[in-house]
Image (tube, rainbow, N blue to C red):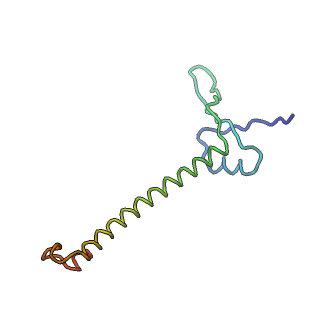
Amino acid sequence: MLVRDVVQIDHMTKLEPVLSFFKKGQSHMAVVTKVESVEDKDPELKMIGIITLEDIIEELVEKHEEEEDEDIKALHGEELRHKEKLVLLFSDQKTRGAGNSLSDVEA
């Protein structure tokens, strides 16, 4: 039977130190703790959850995917603006009207 000490991490700990600890291979899970003060008593260490290497990886991948989605939406909007300019540029002179010129479309 393999027995290991439980790793405790304060709830305010940043992601980088936790990820570094997990990458060392000593553990891929830790207990998240928080010190709570109660009137007339000593502060107590409360367990508020667990965190795993998988949790961190999922969070990083999700954030990366959200950033990619934002980039794709911005590019799609840019493509639509270019398409509209091309339509105006190549449309019939009669449908474009008298005031539209190449310089109007480029603006």
* 41 vs 92: above or below: above
Which residue occupies 61% across, 33% down? 34
Q: Nearer the viewer, residue 45 or 69?
A: 69
Quadrant in the picture for residue 46: top right
Residue lying farthest left?
A: 98
Which residue occupies 31% across, 67% down? 81
Residue 30 appears at what percent x and percent y?
69, 39
Which residue occupies 44% across, 57% down? 70
Which residue occupies 40% across, 61% down? 74
Residue 19 appears at what percent x and percent y?
66, 49
Residue 2 appears left or right of 39: right
Quadrant in the picture for residue 89: bottom left
Q: Nearer the viewer, residue 29 or 94?
A: 94
Residue 81 appears left or right of 51: left
Q: Nearer the viewer, residue 62 or 33?
A: 62
Residue 103 appears at what percent x and percent y?
23, 79
> Where the C terminus falls, by quadrant?
bottom left
Residue 31 appears at what percent x and percent y?
68, 35
> Where the N terminus falls, by quadrant?
top right
Residue lying farthest bottom?
A: 102
Quadrant in the picture for residue 104: bottom left
Counting the numbered discs, the total is 0
* 26 vs 88: above or below: above
Residue lying farthest right?
A: 1
